[in-house]
Amino acid sequence: MELTTLTYAFVGATFALYIGIAFWARASTTGEFYVAGKGIHPVANGMATAADWMSAASFISMAGLIAFNGYGASVFLMGWTGGYVLLALLLAPYLRKFGKFTVPEFIGERYYSRTARIVAVICLILASITYVIGQMKGIGVAFSRFLETDYDTGLYIGMAIVFIYSVMGGMKGITYTQIAQYCVLIFAYTVPAIFISLNITGNPIPQLGILSTMAEGNTYMMDKLNLVVSELGFNEYTTQVLGSKLNMFAYTLTLMIGTAGLPHVIIRFFTVPKVKDARVTAGWALVFIAILYTTAPAVGSMARLNLMNTIQTGPVGEATGNIAYENRPQWFKNWESTGLLKFEDKNGDGRIQYYNDKNKEFAEKAESFGWKGNEMVKVDRDIMVLANPEIANLPNWVIALVVAGGLAAALSTAAGLLLAIASSISHDLLKGIFKPDITERHELMAGRIAMAGAIGAAGYFGLHPPDFAAGTVAIAFGLAASSIFPALMMGIFNKNVNRTGAVAGMVTGIGITMLYVFQHKGIMFIPDTSFLGDMSPNWFFGISPNAFGCVGALANFAVAIGVSKMTAAPPEHIQHLVEDIRIPAGAPAATEH
Amino acid sequence: MNKNSDYWKENLRLVVVLLTIWFAVSFLFGIILVDTLNTIRVGGVGLGFWFAQQGSIYVFLALIFVYTKKMNALDRKYNVHED
């Protein structure tokens, strides 16, 4: 069958499934809208958490970043998995014991302060909206390719679908749909990886494929890739760093603590029946996440190898060594029409030269071949996963499946985040602070309006995203890392931190991080307003804006503890509350309100 | 109260041990010592690279399940488990 028809069929069938489940499990009470009814099994909850977690950034964007950054992209792999260790050991069981709906609710009660709760809501909204912008970029890429339109149109259609989808559901619907979405996305991710690994290395297990030799000859696959990229002036794949080692350290740490501070993930641990289950749910979530994350390095490296081999068909420097533009494969043409892939025939020879013209030494050598600069003027990293099966000549149904999987990943996370935004506005701000006597129906309505507003804002920024999907998402992690994680952790592990300290800490942490991001990436990500420029020489110790959250978090801890020392200790009943959170016995039933 | 604070201390000790391993496999093996470890090869890649892109994730998984198991035992030992 033709690719377009197949794609429509796959995407249509999976969407019908999700919407069917959402309709069947439609939320009717506020409790069900925010957190699914109690009694979801840890394995099922772990799977739903994994779907919630793995977004367009993981599915669509990450392998593309791995493909072009090689070893440097390890920050995403370690950062987005290692955070689960922190979550399981430092937060999940205690937050479950506390047993409330939302993260700001915990912060408000532990720090006995409405101000703390409001500050937490603001931090949470900033982090979540930035995160949704990243999803919108991914959704835009997927829809533009699938509907064969330009990126902007793809984005508008994606916004409409996310809107219908998340406003209707609520958590109960979302938990069951997310289990379905996990199955779709993991199948869609691993099937092409197995095919490609088999093609290139003869080993069907991608995790072992990257360690193996090429199917033909006995060169190791990674050695071959290193050779192919360095021959064209690019950095060696397995050793290239992202900025510097210090930047990689900071980046990884930021993503890890951001993981443990993101409200849409934490909220899931409120829904398990027992404290014991909260611990093991984090483990199961990571099992399901690890399946994709350990496959991603294979997807990235093999996509890069295939891409290089498609363009550089013969020896470097020989006139016929490069593919002629008119002979370019179909996938190349498809992606050109989205505007995310661009070719410019700089030396007018009708062939494609793809090399690193920023490498001075190699650029000189290239000139002697008659090359006048890199002709692949735009290769958007975010297209790699979607283009990968086409580049590897896999059957059409595999390509259709990947599109459906990418959409599943983006939708599930966008919906989870929108829910966290909705609950913080309607539950924390309206019901908790400004209008305690609000009816359930009005609270639900306010939540839905908040979702619509958030989609609009995220879509607007999605038209000019500050970075690739994964980069944008990394900024969201920085914001969560610098504000929410320290407040939660100190709330449990340090009895002496009081309300003044907590508020001062959160404001300092997120303030420093936002200032740093905005001065390099532009105020509200509008590029012209960046007053220091997004250039590495201006970076603080070479730490990129995406990686700066851990510095903000450090400041948060220091300020909170310092200020608490100078002001009155928390009242007795709060000290007892903390002692009570620390032991599992006597946990309230899951979210019965 | 004493019983509960002993429970908490033992819990903290476990968390510190597990987080030390967490730090070692990711930040230490995957970033700080990566070049040294890369001199040892696993199949076609260096050991440091392997830890950064594969090994650390497997260890993270093991850490959470070990923690779960140990904490369940600890809950019972101090009789603070649910039900």
Image: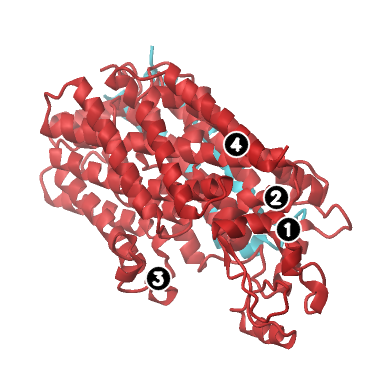
Chain colours: A red, B cyan
Residue at image x 44%, y 35%? Answer: A88
Circle nearer the N terminus (2, 3): 2
Give the SS element for disc 1: loop
Circle nearer the N terminus (2, 4): 4
Q: Do the residues labelled 2 and 1 touch (CB within 8 Å)?
A: yes
**Residue closer to the observer: B71 or A220:** A220
Question: Label 1 is placed on what type of residue?
Answer: Pro
Instruction: Report x, y in % for residue A282.
Output: 48, 32
User: Which residue is tagged 3?
Assistant: A534
Instruction: Report x, y in % for residue B9.
Output: 37, 34
**Residue closer to the observer: A403 or B57:** A403
**Residue closer to the observer: A551 or A102:** A102
User: Which residue is tagged 2?
Assistant: A390
Q: Mark 1 lies on which chain?
A: A
- Above or below, A501 against A45 in this view is below
- Above or below, B26 against A404 in this view is below
The numbered mark at residue B41 is none
Q: Are marks 1 and 4 in contact (CB under 8 Å)?
A: no
Question: Label 3 is placed on what type of residue?
Answer: Asp
